[in-house]
Image (tube, helix red, strand yellow):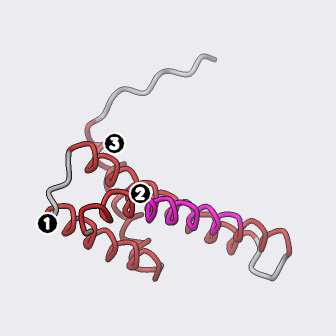
Amino acid sequence: MKEEKEKFSLKKRAASFRFAFQGIKTLLQSEHNAWIHLTATILVFCFGFYFKISSQEWMTVCFAIGFVFSMEIINTAFEKLCDFVSPEKHELIKQIKDLSAAAVLIAAITAFVIGCIIFIPKIV
């Protein structure tokens, strides 16, 4: 039997946004590092306004911030899934968690380098 394509529903779209915002709330409630990223984001925005960075610099900064938060969310999801699937210690689960944490680290280092490239010349 052929599946019928689901009709567009404004109510369902609104619900998907609520679920996404609930995910952000969960991230901020459960992850200390998310608060560090949020603090860094606020500082970068303040510096951006103070130094009047260009539109291209704003796009780069916003992309870097989004990249870090996206990686942090994915890392948190992997960690929670691993804890659910295997509450006991397991070497493979440890490796999965380490790899997802490494993704956040790489994103954060990338964002830091982008920040340095944009802001150091303005500070100096």
Q: Which comes sooner in the sequence, label 3 or label 1?
A: 3
Circle 1 sits in a helix, a strand or a loop, which is it? helix
Indicate the quadrant where residue 90 lies. Answer: bottom right
Q: Position of residue 99 (x, y in %)?
A: 70, 64
Q: CA distance from mark 2 to mark 3?
A: 38 Å
Circle 3 sits in a helix, a strand or a loop, which is it? helix
Amino acid bearing label 2:
Ile
Badge 3 density bin: few <14, some 14–19, many ≥20, Cα 10 Å? few
User: On residue 50, which mark appears?
Assistant: 1
* Residue closest to the far front: 124
* Residue 94 can be seen, yes or no: yes
* Residue closest to the far right: 91
- Horizontal arrangement in the rendering, residue 71 relative to residue 121 (left or right): right
In which quadrant is the C terminus drawn?
bottom left
Amino acid bearing label 1:
Tyr
- Horizontal arrangement in the rendering, residue 74 relative to residue 49 (left or right): right
Q: Position of residue 10 (x, y in %)?
A: 26, 37
**Residue contact between numbered discs 3 and 1, judged by CB atoms under 8 Å:** no
Specify start and end residues of the magenta stretch as a single range. 99-114
In which quadrant is the N terminus drawn?
top right
Badge 1 density bin: few <14, some 14–19, many ≥20, Cα 10 Å? few
* Residue closest to the far top: 2
Q: Where is mark 3, residue-wise?
A: 12
Taking depth in this image into account, of 106 and 20 the one nearest to the observer is 106
Q: Where is mark 2, residue-wise?
A: 114
Q: Main secondary structure of the magenta part?
A: helix
Circle 2 sits in a helix, a strand or a loop, which is it? helix
* Residue at x-position 25% and y-position 69%: 123
Taking depth in this image into account, of 82 and 71 the one nearest to the observer is 71
Q: Position of residue 61 (x, y in %)?
A: 33, 54
Indicate the quadrant where residue 104 lies. Answer: bottom right
Q: CA distance from mark 1 to mark 2?
A: 17 Å
